Amino acid sequence: MKRRLFKLALFLLLGAIVNVAVAWGCAIRLDIRKSSGTSLYRSLYPDESQSEDPFWMVSRLTRPGAMHLFSHRGMPHHGPSPSALEGLPESLVPNWARDELLPWQSSSITQLNDFGNWTVDARGWPQLSLWCVWARKILRLRPAEGGIQLPERWVMEHDRQWLRVTTLPYRPIWPGFAINTIFYATILWLLTLGPFTARRMIRRKRGLCIKCGYDLRGMDHDKCPECGH
């Protein structure tokens, strides 16, 4: 029993390690800009909607292995026209990121320093399992929270340069982290112990010794006469 529990704990640990490695690989390799996206805007003062009211925007990009949430609040002359301030940005925010983003919808913005961009980045496959958040106020990028930020680098694409920020997230997303861990632990078990388990089951069904394959049919021995198992 102890041996089985030890194997279970070992494979779950290895599954968690593979889970983190896959999520970090998605963070490094996947270009989130090449993804389908949705953006929604709304006024922060819906009862007194004016052309100069600050607005809140959430843009969500998704692809297998990644989700990128970009949230911005500012004045209309820095963003969409007043007629575009329609929608429910909070509908684009998953439950695990709501504590980071949803308080803004009722915030009173009175100073320019309160304006800024917040980015939530989640990675993992087959489920999103790890995430992080960072903020940019004015032109200052705050260090990532819940992630290891790699050095920024400029990337040239189609004769244009853009600054790529890569962060290795380590905040778990539940239940995605648990699902991925079990998924990878099962794969590791099938690759390592699965063939041996299948062989023992076949030998037992055929009346053979499960260790050496000696034919035990018609014998009343408690042990295999060939290997002593």
Image (cartoon, helix red, strand yellow):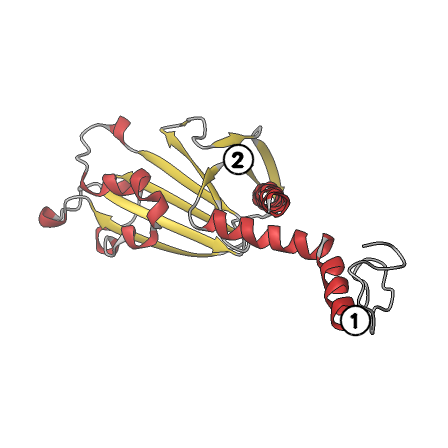
Mark sitting on residue 160 = none
Left or right of residue 144, residue 92 in this image: left
Q: Which mark is residue 167?
A: 2
Q: Is residue 80 visible?
A: yes
Left of 202 or right of it: where is 226? Answer: right
Q: Residue 47 at what x, y percent from top left?
A: 9, 49
Which of pointers 1 and 2 indicates the residue nearer the eye? 1
Relative to the observer, which residue lies in front, 136 or 200?
A: 200
Q: Is 164 or 80 nearer to us in this picture?
A: 164
Sequence order check: which comes first, mark 1 or mark 2? 2
Location of mark 1 (residue): 207
The C terminus - image quarter: bottom right
* Residue 165 appears in view: no
> Which residue is located at x 24 percent, y 39 percent?
104
Amino acid type shown at disc 2: Thr
Secondary element at tag 2: strand
Q: Residue at x 60, y 43 (%)?
A: 2
Whole-Å distance between the Cαs marked 1 and 2?
A: 56 Å
